[in-house]
């Protein structure tokens, strides 16, 4: 069965995922910042049963980034 994508905040799951790949996320200060962000940013989690197997945190740096351009032709 494929993981389900759910929208919820779970800083502890983010901490666990980062700890599981120290070769990619090995800077403790940066990891603490990601975990803090996970408590306030919109988050999408990949969940397989009871286990969180992936995460995407969505940071909107500019309001224009949210709006998709209108690509329709007249």
Image: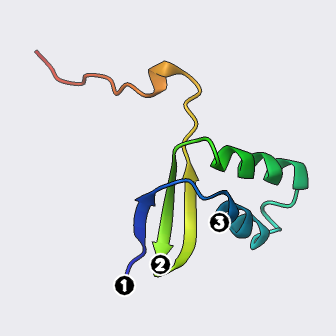
Q: Which residue is tagged 1?
A: 1
Q: Are marks 3 and 2 in contact (CB under 8 Å)?
A: no
Q: Earlier in the sequence, mark 3 or mark 1?
A: 1
Q: Tell me where residue 24 appears, x and y as whole percent.
A: 78, 62
Q: Which residue is tagged 2?
A: 48
Q: Are marks 2 and 1 in contact (CB under 8 Å)?
A: yes
Q: Earlier in the sequence, mark 2 or mark 1?
A: 1
Give the Cα separation between the discs numbered 3 and 2: 13 Å
Q: Secondary structure at mark 1?
A: loop
- The residue located at (48%, 72%) in the rendering is 47
Q: Secondary structure at mark 3?
A: helix
* Residue at the right extreme, as displayed: 28
Question: Which of these two is toward me, 56 or 50?
Answer: 50
Label 3 Cα neighbours within 10 Å, binned few <14 / some 14-19 / many ≥20: some
Please identify the quadrant where the N terminus is shown: bottom left
Q: Tell me where residue 61 appears, x and y as whole percent.
A: 59, 27
Q: Which residue is tagged 3?
A: 13
**47 over 28 or under it: above or below:** below
Give the Cα separation between the discs numbered 3 and 1: 20 Å
Question: Which of these two is toward me, 42 or 63?
Answer: 42
């Amino acid at each position: 069965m494929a993981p389900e994508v759910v929208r919820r905040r779970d800083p502890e799951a983010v901490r666990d995922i980062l700890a599981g790949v120290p070769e990619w996320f090995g800077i403790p200060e940066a990891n603490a910042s990601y975990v803090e962000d996970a408590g306030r940013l919109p988050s999408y989690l990949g969940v397989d049963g009871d286990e969180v197997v992936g995460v995407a945190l969505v940071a909107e740096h500019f309001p224009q980034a949210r709006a998709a351009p209108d690509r329709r032709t007249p």
